[in-house]
Every structure is written in structure tokens, then in C-alpha cells.
Image (cartoon, rainbow, N blue to C red):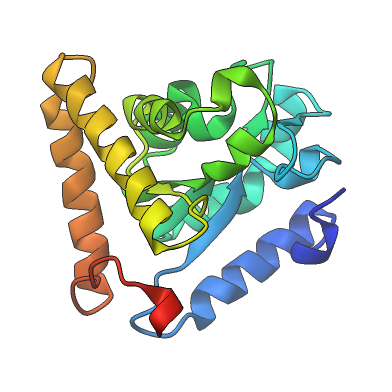
Amino acid sequence: AYIHTRSFGTDVATVTSHVNAALAGAVEGVGVAVKHFPGHGVTTVDTHESLGQAETSFAGWRDDHAQPFRSAIDQDVAVVMFGHLVFSDLDNQPASLSGTWVDLVRQQWGYTGVIATDDLSMLEGSGLPEYRDVSANAVTAVSAGVDLLIDSGGRDAQSARERLSASVDAVAAAVEAGDIPVAQIDQSAVRVFHLRQSLGGVARPLEDTESG
């Protein structure tokens, strides 16, 4: 699999053990994220270039790949990053845009922490026309119940701001139109606020990293 050099192993017991050790060893002030939910080991493709299609059944995932994530969630891991991975047994949308996957983690597993997308610009890199608009992807992700959106598609500080503004405006418009409940935005804001508090403060505003 593409992800093999970035993973904790290839069997569920080893991976779960390493996940537990990483969580136990995390220092105060560091927000740990587990990724790429529901598990990049189910596909051999590089999701920077295309959507990952699961090469296992949902039942097979539940009994194997799900276990390290479930263990982390049972320990209240700070963030779960959802990958651009498609399990057609459950949903034809990638997990990063899927309300079905969010509901599984929230309702069935009882997770109350922050859910984040993988880099949204990767969806554009898939070449599929339905994912070429970062602001539309942002709306779909937030509609699904994701709390934090990651996007590194800007080539410089100015284009990063433009992409950010377009996504914020699109989500705001969806809220104003009633497509995304205000209460859902409030819940996400509370989760992110609690995460920031747990890390000792408030994140800095967007900075021009090119100038240091």
C-alpha cells in the first residue's frame, strides 16, 4: 500500500499497540490526531493523485482496520482525520465528505472530539470534476459534520487567503440558506474551542510564512 512507510504496521494487534503507546506518550500541550480514517491500508493508491477505493468489505474493515481507530477514540484522542477514502459498501463519497462516516464515529462510537478532513486540495488533484471546487468540497465536508478543514492548495499567502475566503463564504452562504444548521456550526466551534483550550491557548491568525 502507498501508506506503508508511514504506518505503524500491517497487523491490527501491532498497530493498535503502537497507537496506544503514542497516546500514552503524548506530551502535555500536543493535540494528537489519528489518521487517515477509516484506514489508508485498505487501498494501494496515493490519495494525493486519486481517490482511494477500499479493497476490502465493510465487515472486513470493521473487524480489522477499524480497531486502532476505535481504541484511540475510546481514549478520547483529540482529533480524528478523515481520509479521501471510499468504501462503496457504506458510502460512495470519500470519508472526508461523508455524513455516514461521521455518524458512525459520533453515534455508534460515541466520539466527542474534533473531526478534520485530510488536505482538501488532494480532492482537486484526483482529477474528478465533482471535486474540482475547493469551496464546494468545504460545504460538503461541513454539511457532513466535519469540524476542521485542512487545505494546502494555496501556492503563496495570497492564494491561500483567497481559497480560505471562498470556502468561508460558501459555508456561510449554506448556513444562511438553511442547508447547514446553525446549531451544527455551534457544536463544531465548541469542539474546536475545547481543543484549543486543551493546548494552552488560542491559535494565531493566518500568517505570511514566506516572510518568516
Front-lying residue, 124 or 208: 208
Judge whether 182 appears above or below 117 on screen: above
- x and y, in percent, of residue 182 in the image: 12, 28
Q: Which residue is drawn at 23% across and 67% down?
A: 205
- Residue 165 horizontal/vertical position (percent): 28, 43
Q: Does residue 123 appear in this view?
A: yes
Drawn side of residue 37 relative to residue 136, left or right: right
In terms of depth relative to the viewer, which is nearer, 142 or 63? Answer: 142
Which residue is nearer to you in this view: 166 or 63?
166
Quadrant placement of the C terminus: bottom left
Q: In which quarter of the image is residue 173?
A: top left
Q: In the image, 35: left or right of 172?
A: right
**What residue sits 51% from the left and 49% below the top?**
81
* Percent coordinates x, y for residue 32 in the rendering: 46, 68
Q: Residue at x 43, y 23 (%)?
A: 99
Q: In which quarter of the image is residue 34?
A: bottom right
